[in-house]
Amino acid sequence: MNVKPILDKLYIKPAEAETKTAGGIFIPGTATESPTTGTVIAVGTGRITRDGSVVSLVVKEGDVVMYNKGAGIKVDDYLILAEDQVLAVIE
């Protein structure tokens, strides 16, 4: 499936959930938390303002971003979220 987001939407591949602690203890699948970071796969064209002009997005393809837990809409193993749901770009 080829997905191209529109307007201010982002198509994100969430990072894999941690399955092992820093001390080497394995975490069972039911106890893992959903990731709150991911890689931007595709971006929309931009946000439209009240006067009709288009403001380009700050986030670009390939950026690793941080977002709130439970944000966006899940599509298969990916997320679609609005740019304003992104908290930070991780460098």
Image: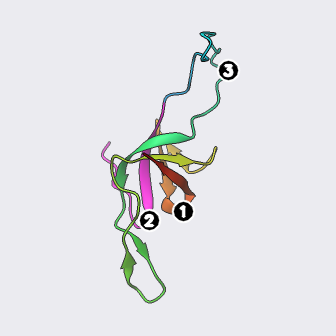
Q: Are marks 2 and 1 in contact (CB under 8 Å)?
A: yes
Amino acid type at mark 3: Thr
- Work out whether mark 1 precedes mark 3 in sequence or the reverse, and give the earlier one: 3
Residue indicated by mark 1: 84
The image quarter in which residue 21 lies: top right
- Work out whether mark 3 precedes mark 2 in sequence or the reverse, and give the earlier one: 2
Pick whichever, 2 or 14, lies toward us: 14
Residue visible at 56% across and 51% down in the picture: 72
- Relative vertical location of residue 28 with respect to residue 69 in this rendering, above or below: above
Helix, strand or loop at disc 3?
Answer: loop
Amino acid type at mark 2: Asp
**Number of residues whose C-alpha sits closer than 10 Å to that of mark 2, classed few (under 14), some (14–19) or many (20 or more):** many
Residue visible at 34% across and 51% down in the picture: 42
Residue visible at 64% across and 15% down in the picture: 27
Residue indicated by mark 3: 30
Amino acid type at mark 1: Asp
Helix, strand or loop at disc 2?
Answer: loop
Distance, label 2 to label 1, CA atoms, is 8 Å
Residue indicated by mark 2: 8
- Image quarter of the C terminus: top left
Residues in magenta? 1-15
